[in-house]
Image: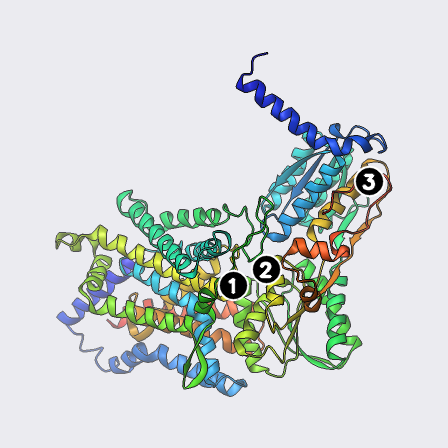
């Protein structure tokens, strides 16, 4: 046999493919149809949002779980173009994929496209977008739980009476859901007094929020707690609090986490004391698992909720946690969610 | 647009000098005063109003953070003023700033270099992008708006390529799965966070000092040097300047280089303040900077791009926004107010000034 460049490339590709299938090989026969032959299964991830750490991590979770199952994954990325995203669902239907994950998007544009996919006999799950379809399970990171965890920690740290600054921009679905919890808390604890509300999504968000927060803390130096239920908001508030020299008198509670957030929380004397977060990679894994259950004829439930984890400054310091990987390693509840895990489900390897 | 304006005012000046209209004499002083000092009076009035309406507005600290809140957009605005002066426009400043922010973060966190290298890299990027803008506009004859619009998109994409769309922070996970070892050097962070003593300890942030220094520099440069005056000449009538023997293309290219360098300085300060490289389009920076420069037309009745006006314009927007935030006014009304100020300033510039002269 002559070793032309082409044959070498073929062999390399074959080896690569084989090595990727290897971990699944042993368990494949234990899995229900169609996963008894996972190489023939193709799923599509149709994305609306893709830039940013959260979406990168989400994709890595989807990839990891798809690899663990041994199925083929096709990623279609509409880059915030709602019409294109709907077209991409149709494209996926035309390609004859077995399952589709819709990641974010607008209800109005995705509802009919999702219905067309269901009509074509394709299994569909949706993450963080409500497509108003009973055949389509919703994957959610529970925004209400995120806000609740952070606020419960604030009550634990500061008692039931404090003056609060609140960062909020209306009309963004996850922020609206977090806002519901904030309203409930204010009702439940009348001692919480909201003296200022502000917020903006002007790019770069942290810088714009820092400018606003600086004015707010100057006008209201008696604020004790800043509730900033989005990490970009919290970053901005922290900059302002540092600049105003009020790190000792203000505590910041937020939601979401990233490597940059971890280092900001761990700065000596940081006012950012706690955040509640779901691991986006885990949400990605859960999305694929829920879809796999549907494909295998099982019911993951109408709404699949990935529970959040509370991350405090103390926990980060005690564990000397510097980035997301170390966070996942030190906090098992953050690295893994026991959601949508039937017995046969292979899980991505953990380190 | 600005070219026309510059010509108009120059022409108007000439006709004014040739034959002063006697009928307009009586109203002129009043109107003249209104035009010359109207905006400054309005700014002063705003400050008085906010001092009475909010707690803590009249403190040295408040003055400083208002300056700080406009320092980055102010620096960008001063840069774009240079391109307005030569009758051009630079839409790419916002994305130059965010690209330079990403570059600073990349150099320190991924390449593990020190603050000096990071700053030099950013300035080089700013100068290079400005140079390319200028070359495209002058030698490829692409209209300025289109050339810089293209550059804007190019940079928004380019700044994401090295990290595959991730923001850059110390300890970040790289695309290949390894962890970045570098950190933001303290010297670099000091650019955004260090405070100089000025009567009160730790009062004036470095970014404000940079803004003031750059404002004075560009003001002196544009108003009092031959180079600056020639730039105005190029802006008001490029052909006449060319006939007079001025290397018009060189002046224009320099204007874009200045704009690019100023934008990259803004990006450096942004990176130093945030302490990370955030993927962002920088469009809000662009819009705010352009607004400040356009409001500047109305200051002192200049009716042309000028550095002093730009600085006052930026300050005006800063006072207004910070004052409104202190009064707990929601964010969407702030955009409205910003827009209203801009419209009023432009009407002021074009309508009032056009009539009196």
Answer few, some or many: residues within 10 Å of disc 1's Cα (few below 14, many 20 plus, some between 14 and 19). Answer: many
Residue indicated by mark 2: A260
Q: Which mark is residue A345?
A: 3
Q: In screen coordinates, is B131 left or right of A312? A: left
Foreground pick, B312 / A329: A329
Task: Identify the chain of the residue marked 3, using the numbered disc in the image.
Answer: A
Answer few, some or many: residues within 10 Å of disc 2's Cα (few below 14, many 20 plus, some between 14 and 19). Answer: many
Residue A159 horizontal/vertical position (percent): 76, 80
Q: Which mark is residue B275?
A: 1
Do tag 1 and tag 2 residues touch (Cβ < 8 Å)?
Answer: yes
Query: In the displayed structure, would residue A40 be above or below residue B65?
Result: above
Q: CA distance from mark 3 to mark 2?
A: 33 Å
Foreground pick, A2 / A200: A2
Q: In screen coordinates, is A282 left or right of B269? A: right
Foreground pick, B302 / A277: A277
The image quarter in which residue A236 lies: bottom right
């Amino acid at each position: 046999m002559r070793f032309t460049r082409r044959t070498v490339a073929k062999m390399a590709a074959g080896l690569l493919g084989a090595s990727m299938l290897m971990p699944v090989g042993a368990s494949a026969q234990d899995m229900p149809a169609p996963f008894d032959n996972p190489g023939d299964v193709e799923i599509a991830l149709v994305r609306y949002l893709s830039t940013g750490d959260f979406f990168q991590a989400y994709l890595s979770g989807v990839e990891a779980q798809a690899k663990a199952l041994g199925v083929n994954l096709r990623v279609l990325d509409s880059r915030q173009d709602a019409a294109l995203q709907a077209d991409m669902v149709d494209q996926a239907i035309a390609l004859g994929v077995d399952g589709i994950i819709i990641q974010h998007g607008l209800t109005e544009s995705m509802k009919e496209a999702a219905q067309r996919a269901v009509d074509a006999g394709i299994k569909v799950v949706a993450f963080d977008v409500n497509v108003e379809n009973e055949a389509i399970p919703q994957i959610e990171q529970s925004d209400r739980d995120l806000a609740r965890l952070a606020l419960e920690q604030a009550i634990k740290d500061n008692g039931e009476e404090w003056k609060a600054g609140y960062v909020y921009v209306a009309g963004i679905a996850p922020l609206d859901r977090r806002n519901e919890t904030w309203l409930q808390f204010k009702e439940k604890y009348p001692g919480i007094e909201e003296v200022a509300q502000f917020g903006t999504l002007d790019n770069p968000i942290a810088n714009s929020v820092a400018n606003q927060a600086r004015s707010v803390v100057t006008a209201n130096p008696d604020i004790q707690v800043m509730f900033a239920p989005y990490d970009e908001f919290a970053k901005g508030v922290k900059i302002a609090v540092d600049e105003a020299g009020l790190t000792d008198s203000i505590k910041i509670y937020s939601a979401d986490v990233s490597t940059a957030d971890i280092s900001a929380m761990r700065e000596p004397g940081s006012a950012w004391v706690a955040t509640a977060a779901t691991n986006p990679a885990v949400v990605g894994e859960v999305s694929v698992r829920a879809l796999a259950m549907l494909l295998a004829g099982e019911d993951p439930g109408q709404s699949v909720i990935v529970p959040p984890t509370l991350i405090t400054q103390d926990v980060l310091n005690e564990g000397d946690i510097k980035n997301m990987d170390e966070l996942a390693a030190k906090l098992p509840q953050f690295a893994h969610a026991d959601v949508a895990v039937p017995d046969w489900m292979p899980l991505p390897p953990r380190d | 647009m600005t070219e026309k304006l510059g010509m108009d005012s120059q022409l108007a000046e000439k006709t004014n000098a040739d034959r002063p209209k006697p009928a307009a004499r009586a109203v002129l002083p009043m109107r003249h005063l209104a035009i010359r000092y109207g905006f400054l009076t309005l700014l002063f009035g705003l400050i008085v109003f906010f001092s009475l309406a909010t707690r803590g507005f009249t403190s040295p600290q408040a003055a400083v953070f208002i300056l700080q809140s406009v320092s980055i957009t102010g620096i960008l605005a001063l840069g774009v003023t240079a391109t307005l002066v030569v009758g051009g426009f630079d839409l790419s400043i916002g994305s130059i700033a965010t690209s330079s922010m990403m570059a600073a973060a990349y150099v320190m966190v991924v390449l593990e270099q020190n603050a000096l290298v990071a700053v030099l890299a950013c300035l080089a990027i700013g100068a290079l992008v400005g140079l390319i803008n200028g070359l495209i506009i002058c030698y490829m004859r692409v209209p300025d708006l289109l050339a810089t619009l293209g550059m804007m998109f190019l940079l928004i994409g380019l700044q994401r390529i090295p990290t595959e769309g991730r923001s850059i922070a110390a300890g970040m996970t790289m695309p290949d799965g390894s962890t970045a070892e570098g950190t933001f050097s303290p010297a670099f962070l000091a650019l955004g966070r260090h405070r100089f003593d000025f009567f009160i300890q730790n009062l004036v942030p470095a970014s404000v000092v940079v803004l003031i220094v750059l404002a004075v520099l560009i003001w002196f440069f544009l108003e009092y040097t031959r180079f600056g005056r020639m730039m105005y000449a190029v802006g008001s009538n490029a052909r006449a300047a060319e006939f007079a023997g001025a290397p018009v293309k060189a002046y224009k290219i320099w204007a874009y280089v200045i704009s690019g360098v100023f934008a990259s300085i803004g990006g450096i300060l942004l990176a130093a303040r945030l302490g990370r490289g955030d993927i962002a389009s920088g469009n809000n920076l662009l819009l705010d900077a352009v607004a400040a420069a356009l409001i500047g037309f109305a200051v002192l009745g200049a009716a042309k791009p000028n550095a002093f006006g730009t600085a006052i314009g930026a300050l005006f927007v800063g006072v207004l926004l910070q004052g409104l935030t202190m009064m707990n006014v929601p964010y969407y009304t702030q955009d409205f107010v910003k827009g209203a100020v801009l419209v009023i300033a432009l009407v002021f510039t074009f309508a009032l000034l056009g009539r009196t002269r």
